[in-house]
Every structure is written in C-alpha cells, then in structure tokens.
C-alpha cells in the first residue's frame, strides 16, 4: 500500500587565455570525470579589433567580434564593463558592452559562435516574449526558434545568454567537431551513462542593440535552480519513449493474474504495443505482506498470481511488451517478516537517543550498517536484475525522508557519518549498481523528495498520487535535462481539469469521443514525458477511448525550450521537431475545464478564435507557412504573419497545428499516425525537381489507416502514388492532396508520388 570564494574576474590578452582551474570544493566526479568550476569564464577582449573570447572548463565557449556604428555608419569605440556576482554560491558573470563615448543612435552588433558539448542546445531565458504569448516550449532535436537567446550545455551545466525578446538570435551551425554520439532511433531506449562525449556542437550567435549584455552562469541547474545533486558530467538522460501501462491507479491492490491476462489480451488485440506502448508495470499488487524486505517482493502472492513472477514476466514478453515492477522502502512494523528481522538484527535499524527503536508507522533502516544494506537492499535489486525486469520503480521517497528528518532521529544523525539525504540516496545507489544502466529506474514521490536522487534515477514522479497535468508545465525545464518527468500515470478517463461530458470530434470516426481521452495522453507526448496508462481493462476494450492513446505514443525525447518554470495550466504548447530532411513546429492549444463552485467538477466554456502571430511563436514573420490542424484534418491555408486558430466549443478540448515553412514544390503537410504529424512516422522525404517526384519512407501500424496530406503549391496536381506492397487511395483538393493506405503489417514502407505541373 502507498504511504501517502568569491572568484575575481580575469581579463587577459586574446592570445594568452589559460585553462580554468577547478575549485577545490568541487565534488569529485563519480566516474573520474573532472567537474567544472563554479566560477566565471576567462575573458579575452581586444578593444582595438573588437574580438571577444570566453573560455570555461579548459575549452573555448565563445568566439565573437563586436562592432559599433553610429547612424552615419561611422565606427564607434566600445567599452566593456565586467561584473561577477557570487551571492549564495550562485555565480553570475555579466559582460556589458556600451559605446565608449557620446554618440547618437549607435548600434552594437555581436556576431560569433558558441561552442558546447554534444548535449548543448539553444533555449530561452525569461523575457517579455513569454508575457506577450505564454506557452510551454520544447524541442525534439536542436531548436531554431527565434525566441532563443541562450545556449545551455547540459554536460557541463553552464548557460550563456544574451538579451532576450528577439534581440539575440541563436541558431545551430552545420559545422561541428569531434566524434558524434550514437543517436537512437525513434522510440528506442538506449541510455548512456558517463561516456566521454567528445562531440561538440557549434551555434551561431548574433545580438544587436544600443548596448549588449552577456550573462554566463556556471553550475546553472545545480546552484541557480538548487538541484544540489545534479552532476550531469557523470550521467546522461534516458532517451527514447517511456510509454506503457501501470496497474496502480485503476486497480490498487486488486490487480491479479486474471486481470493481467485480460489486459495483455486487449493490448495485443488492439495492437497497442505496435503503437509504442512498451511497458507493463506491476504496482503494489503482487507482493506478500506490507514490509519492504527482499522476501516479500521476490516471493509473489500466489493467491493473486498463481504463476508467480515467472508467469508474469513471460506473459508480458509474449505480448510484445517489457516488464516493470514496483518496490517500496518502508519496513512496516505489523509485517511478520519485518518483526522477525527487527528481533534478530536490531542493529540494522535507527534508534532514538534513549536507545529505543525509532518507529513511526515503520522501522527505519540504518544505511550506515553495511550488513543491513547487504541483506535488506542489495539482494532485492540483484534478483530483480536476474529475473529480467526492464523497469523498476522505487516508492516511499517522501515517507523515508520524512522519517529520517524526524526530531527523534536527530541524535542518530549526530553520531553517524551520514545525513537524511545521503541515507535516502544509498537505496538508489545500490539499486543502480545492481540493475546496471539498461534498466529504467524511477523514483517517487514528488520533485521535492526525489531531487536528492538526481543522477541515479532515470525518471522522477512530479507530484502526489494522481495524474496532475499542470506539473508537466511547471517542471518542463527538468525534462530531458535532469531526468524524465513522470506525472504518476495517465488515466484517460480521469476527471482532473477535464469536462467529463465533453465529446470531441476526431478524424476517421463517425461519432465523437470523450475529449479527456484525447487531451490527457496528448499532453504527455507534447511534454516529452512519461506516458503510463492506468484505466481498467474495460476502458481499452472500447475503441472510442483509444484514438487519443494511439496518436500520442510513442513519446519523443525532448529538451526544454525555456530555462524557467512556465507556471501551471498553460493553454499553448509548442514542440519543434528537427529532422535531417525537415524542420517544423507542432503547436497545441488546450481548453482546460473551469471548476464548478467547490465541487470536483469541471466544464469547458468554449474558447473564441484567436490570431496567432508567427513572431510570437519564435518563427520568422516575413515567411509563408502552411498550417494544418490534426484532430479535424483541416488545412488552414498558406499564411504570412499569423494564422487564426479556430474557435473551440464546449466539446472540443484540443487543437494541434502543424506549422511548416511553405515550399515551392509539393511537400508533406501532415500525417495521421501521430500528433507530431511526422515526428514518429516519417523517416525520410525528398523532392526530385526534374521528375516532379516526392518520395520517402514511413513507419506504419497494421490495420491503422495511414494518410499523408501533401501541400500543393499553385499549378501542381497529384497524378499517381505508390506505396510498396500496399493498396493506395489518392484524392485531391484545391491546395492539398492525400495518399491513404491501410497497412497490412506493422513495418516501414517506401512511398512515391508523381505530380504534374
């Protein structure tokens, strides 16, 4: 059951920049990698030539040239003011460039390159742009958004930013240096922990204004955001989709072997694993007793699971899924196994000052006792690894941390070489040692408690029990940087912030479907987080409840577009998708329910149409874009400057717009496989201007109608289409054409379209 020294700035000649020295107070890297300094960058500024260089952690991070001209175009001298603030161990190094003397209408221009590791990415610091158009931003691959004014290097936890709100532009550069990291295919999960990562990314930087300020902040998440244990040079974030089913919310302790068979049968019949639902996680349903000892978790309750763990593991794998399991870390006093262990090994547990056991609702393990660790923690995770579990969830973070921090434990921590946080962290340290890097490790509950486990766990639950979608916006800045964000589960029939009566039209279906079954899973994939379903089996037997699930899985790995918390229930979410053959934006608009008085009842009130300016989204305002809405399959036209998001009535809870730059030739506008409209299914796309042929490859699911919608520039018409091994239907409208197949198998297909002009 769940329980509920100040560092002086150095200015040196350009040719004599020296390597940074690591602070002696820096924590040693767990895997032998030298940690970066919590100090300012070394600055090399040559006023005569306007050349600027910054070096940090032994490498160049900025190489740029600064020019200044008055209204007549005459060059103006520039001065540099340098200040470093080290208050509360948060280092902020400010470089401010201004005209050296009086002048009218002087414009400064800083142009250069920022160099970061293979984990660096462009992003945005808070500015007036967010107040003007509030949204949650992330990207699949490198962002090109014009709201970006910073480069954050996750590997070394530094950020370099210029003025925001469009004054600074950061764009990925095609040049790079070193050996690129191995990239995983869509939906795969191949984590790497503590590799050398010698690959460097280069970003073009340009900033203009009457003055220009640069800010460099080392140890950005660790110090400035307060995630003390964040040492990203020792680990990488889990990549790939984390999508599946968790037994907890829908069944609590009533999930049985019979329920498992029924659930796996429905998942197989509906081809949900083909859509990306990979994991089946057993949560607080299988174990014996209530105490956290290896015996209780490794010996299943055979009344509920006659076949035990062996049957469950085989059944899950035979269904094409990966097995996941939940364990706890509290030693409940009423459990007979725990009572025996406490009696036989009293020194394994924490005692109060008077020598009696500390015992609230449970006994508390003394993790400074090696024998206790080797008998109560290590055997459990060693055996789970041997059994073949791919996903392990460790519960009780808040329970155990609260117990360790109890006033009755004060004497223990005064007399033992540990802290409450270190004692908690020992559990995940041992778990990671035994499970290895290939097993996904999740900690819960709440960010406040799990933050002490950073670097050991691959994911962390964001909140208390229950799907709370607002936390995905609140903690967006952590996704893909610190860990993978887990909103606990996603019950598609849940009611939090949802209108339970709203019935939303969805393409391909004759009748509307419950709006919440669309919005809830779609939000998880827009956020790039964990999507673990948790409804009763009957929900998935009804095809009307599956469309939102199908179009939301797998979840693409993202990094945040913003280095700050976005608040809670924002309506607009923007996800950029970068592929070698295309770069586009997916903009989601969500209608949240309004609470009825003090009741736990929410209603959609409807939302009016809204003009959305491309500049507010961070797109070039002088270019033409084609816009397509996913759930209605409506082409909204070729637009410049802005487009109009249609009104939503009291039933329609979500719109998802694909925004692509218009081309002079036919190009894929949208696909029906996934709300990313190509991010999951499109593997390649190319146009042959000689033969007027558009070709590519797509991943499709057996029996799931797959439609490619193509934009037709003026004069083009679709003449024919072929998809290898499949029957094809084509149709043409005034500005778009469609190619439709019903795949005979789950596979990758090659397609080709011929156009006339």
Image (spheres, rainbow, N blue to C red):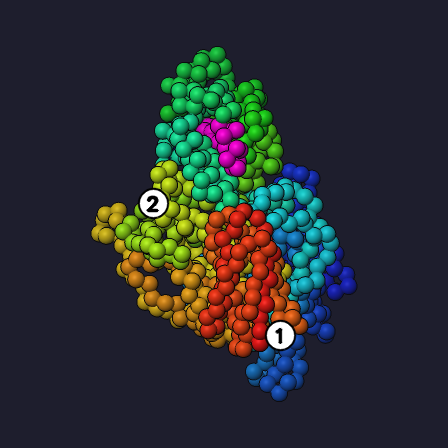
Among all residues in the image, which is located at the extreme right? 15
The region drawn magenta spans 312-329
Label 1 vs label 2: CA separation? 52 Å
Seen at 50% across and 22% down, the residue is: 298
Residue 350 belongs to the span the image colors magenta: no
Identify the element where label 1 is drawn.
Answer: strand
Quadrant of the rendered image containing residue 8: bottom right
Answer few, some or many: residues within 10 Å of disc 2's Cα (few below 14, many 20 plus, some between 14 and 19). some
Residue at the disc numbered 2: 494
Q: Observer-nearest residue: 557 or 650?
A: 650
Query: Given this view, does label 1 or label 2 mark the residue nearer the observer?
Result: 2
Residue 280 vertical position relative to residue 367 in the rendered view, above or below = below
Q: Observer-nearest residue: 460 or 212?
A: 460
Residue at the disc numbered 1: 109
Among all residues in the image, which is located at the extreme bottom? 72
CB-based contact (under 8 Å), mark 1 and mark 2: no
Seen at 33% across and 63% down, the residue is: 648
Residue 737 vertical position relative to residue 467 in the rendered view, above or below = below
Mark 1 vs mark 2: which is more N-terminal? 1
Answer few, some or many: residues within 10 Å of disc 1's Cα (few below 14, many 20 plus, some between 14 and 19). many
Instruction: Work out which quarter of the rendered image holds the C terminus and state it.
Output: bottom right
Identify the element where label 2 is drawn.
Answer: loop
Seen at 53% across and 33% down, the residue is: 317
- In percent of width and height, residue 388 lies at 57, 29
Quadrant of the rendered image containing residue 148: bottom right
Q: Observer-nearest residue: 690 or 494?
A: 690
- Is residue 464 something that shows in the picture? no
């Amino acid at each position: 059951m769940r329980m509920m020294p100040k560092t002086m700035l150095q200015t040196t000649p350009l040719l004599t920049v020296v390597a940074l020295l690591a602070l002696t107070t820096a924590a040693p890297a767990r895997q032998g990698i030298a940690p970066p300094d919590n100090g300012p960058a070394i600055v090399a500024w040559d006023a005569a030539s306007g050349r600027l260089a910054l070096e940090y952690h032994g490498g160049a991070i900025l190489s740029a040239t600064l020019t200044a001209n008055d209204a007549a175009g005459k060059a103006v001298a520039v001065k540099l003011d340098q200040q470093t603030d080290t208050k509360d161990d948060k280092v902020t190094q400010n470089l401010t460039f201004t005209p050296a003397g009086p002048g009218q209408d002087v414009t400064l221009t800083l142009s250069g390159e920022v160099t970061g590791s293979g984990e660096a990415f462009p992003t945005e610091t808070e500015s007036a742009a967010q107040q003007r158009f509030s949204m949650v931003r992330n990207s699949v691959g490198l962002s090109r958004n014009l709201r970006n004014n910073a480069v954050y290097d996750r590997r070394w936890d530094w950020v370099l930013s210029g003025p925001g709100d469009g004054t600074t532009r950061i764009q990925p550069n095609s040049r790079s240096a070193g050996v690129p990291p191995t990239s995983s295919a869509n939906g795969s999960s191949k984590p790497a922990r503590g590799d050398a990562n010698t690959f460097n990314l280069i970003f073009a930087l340009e900033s203009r204004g009457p003055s220009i300020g640069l800010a460099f902040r080392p140890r950005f998440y660790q110090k400035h955001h307060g995630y003390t244990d964040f040492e990203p040079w020792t680990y990488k974030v889990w990549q790939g989709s984390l999508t599946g089913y968790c037994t907890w919310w829908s069944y609590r302790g009533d999930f049985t072997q019979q329920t498992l068979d029924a659930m796996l049968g429905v998942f197989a019949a509906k081809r949900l694993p083909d859509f990306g639902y990979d994991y089946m996680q057993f949560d607080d349903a299988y174990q014996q007793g209530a105490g956290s000892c290896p015996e209780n978790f490794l010996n299943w309750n055979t009344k509920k699971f006659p076949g035990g763990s062996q049957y469950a593991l085989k059944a899950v794998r035979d269904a094409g899924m990966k097995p996941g399991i939940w364990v706890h870390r509290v030693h409940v006093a009423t459990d007979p196994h725990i009572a025996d262990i406490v009696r036989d090994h009293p020194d394994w547990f924490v005692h109060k000052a008077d020598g009696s056991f500390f015992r609230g609702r449970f006994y508390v393990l003394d993790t400074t006792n090696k024998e206790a660790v080797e008998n109560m923690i290590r055997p459990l995770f060693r055996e789970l690894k041997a059994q073949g579990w791919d996903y392990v969830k460790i519960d009780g973070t808040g329970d155990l941390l609260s117990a360790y921090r109890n006033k009755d434990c004060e004497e223990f921590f005064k007399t033992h070489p540990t802290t409450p946080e270190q004692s908690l962290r020992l559990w995940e340290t041992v778990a990671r040692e035994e499970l290895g890097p290939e097993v996904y490790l999740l900690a819960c509950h709440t960010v406040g408690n799990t933050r002490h486990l950073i670097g050991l766990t691959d994911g962390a639950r964001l909140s208390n029990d229950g799907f709370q979608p607002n936390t995905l916006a609140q903690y967006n800045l952590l996704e893909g940087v610190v860990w993978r964000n887990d909103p606990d589960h996603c019950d598609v029939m849940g009611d939090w912030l949802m209108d339970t009566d709203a019935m939303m039209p969805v393409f391909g279906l004759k009748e509307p479907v419950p709006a919440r079954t669309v919005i809830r899973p779609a939000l998880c994939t827009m956020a790039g987080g964990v999507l673990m379903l948790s409804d009763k089996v009957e929900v998935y037997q009804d095809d009307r409840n599956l469309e939102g699930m199908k179009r939301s899985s797998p979840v693409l790995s993202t990094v945040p577009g913003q280095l700050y918390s976005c608040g809670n229930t924002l309506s607009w979410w923007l996800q950029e998708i970068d592929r070698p053959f295309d770069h586009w934006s997916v903009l989601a608009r969500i209608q949240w329910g309004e609470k009825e008085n003090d009741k736990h009842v929410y209603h959609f009130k409807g939302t009016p149409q809204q003009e959305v300016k491309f500049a507010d989204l961070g797109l070039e305002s002088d270019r033409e874009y084609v816009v397509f809405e996913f759930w209605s399959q409506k082409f909204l036209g070729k637009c410049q400057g802005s487009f109009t998001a249609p009104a939503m009535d009291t039933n329609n809870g979500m719109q998802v717009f694909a925004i692509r730059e218009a081309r002079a030739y036919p190009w894929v506008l949208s696909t029906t496989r996934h709300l990313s409209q190509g991010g999951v299914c499109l593997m390649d796309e190319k146009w042959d201007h000689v033969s007027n042929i558009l070709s590519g490859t797509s991943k499709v699911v057996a029996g799931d109608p797959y439609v490619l919608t193509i934009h037709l520039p003026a004069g083009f018409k679709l003449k024919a289409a072929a998809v290898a091994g499949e029957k094809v239907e084509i149709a043409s409208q005034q500005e778009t054409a469609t190619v439709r197949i019903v795949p005979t198998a789950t596979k990758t297909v090659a397609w080709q379209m011929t156009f006339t002009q």
